[in-house]
Image (cartoon, rainbow, N blue to C red):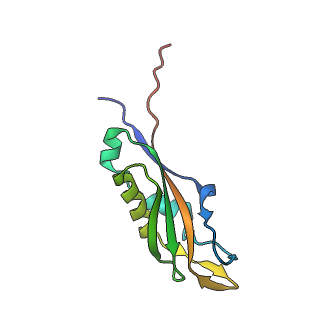
Amino acid sequence: MNSLIKIFVVLIISSICLLAQEKELDKMPSPDGGMSAIAKNVKYPISAKESGIEGKVLITATIDKTGKVTKTEIVNSVNEDCDKAAIDAIKKTKWLPAEKDGKAVSAEITIPIQFKLGCKPKDSKK
C-alpha cells in the first residue's frame, strides 16, 4: 500500500485583504474564532485530491452588518470543485462584521484559500 498523502488546507492569514471601500473602516470583518474557523469548514474535494489538483482560490465576499456572508465571487479559480468547497467554507463560517465609528457595517473582503496536497514521501535513495 502506498504511503498516505496528508492533506493540508492552508489559509494565508496575512493575505485577507480589504477591498477598496467608499469609507474607511475602523475594523475589518473577521472570522469568529480566527482563520482556524474557516480551516475547519474546508473540505478538500475528493475529485481534486484524486486528480492531484492544488492551488489558491481567491474569493471576494460581502459580510453584512450582522456577520452574514451575503455575496461571494470567485476572483481566482482552481477548479469548480475547489471553488465550491472554498465558498461553502466561507459561508459556513461565522463572521464578525466590519466596524465604522463603533457601528457594524457591511464590507467586502478577499479571502484566499490554498488547497495543497502535502507530505509526499521523499525517495531516500540518491
Q: Is residue 26 above or below residue 90?
A: below
Please give the name of the residue rendered at 34% of the width and 45% of the height, measured from the top-left corner: 48
Q: Residue 49, position in %: x, y?
A: 35, 43
Q: Residue 96, position in %: x, y?
A: 56, 75
Seen from the viewer's position, the closer of residues 96 and 36 is 96
88 vs 104, left or right, is left
Q: Is residue 115 visible?
A: no
122 vs 27, left or right, is left
Q: Residue 59, position in %: x, y?
A: 49, 61
Q: Residue 40, position in %: x, y?
A: 45, 60
Please give the name of the residue rendered at 39% of the width and 37% of the height, measured from the top-left corner: 5
Quadrant including the N terminus = top left
Q: Is residue 86 visible?
A: yes
The answer to which quarter of the image holds residue 71 is: bottom left
Q: Count numbered badges in the picture.
A: 0
Seen from the viewer's position, the closer of residues 31 and 125 is 31
Please give the name of the residue rendered at 52% of the width and 75% of the height, measured from the top-left corner: 63
* Residue that extends furthest to the top in the rendered view of this protein: 126
Please give the name of the residue rendered at 69% of the width and 76% of the height, measured from the top-left corner: 24
Q: Is residue 52 above or below residue 86?
A: above
25 vs 61, left or right, is right
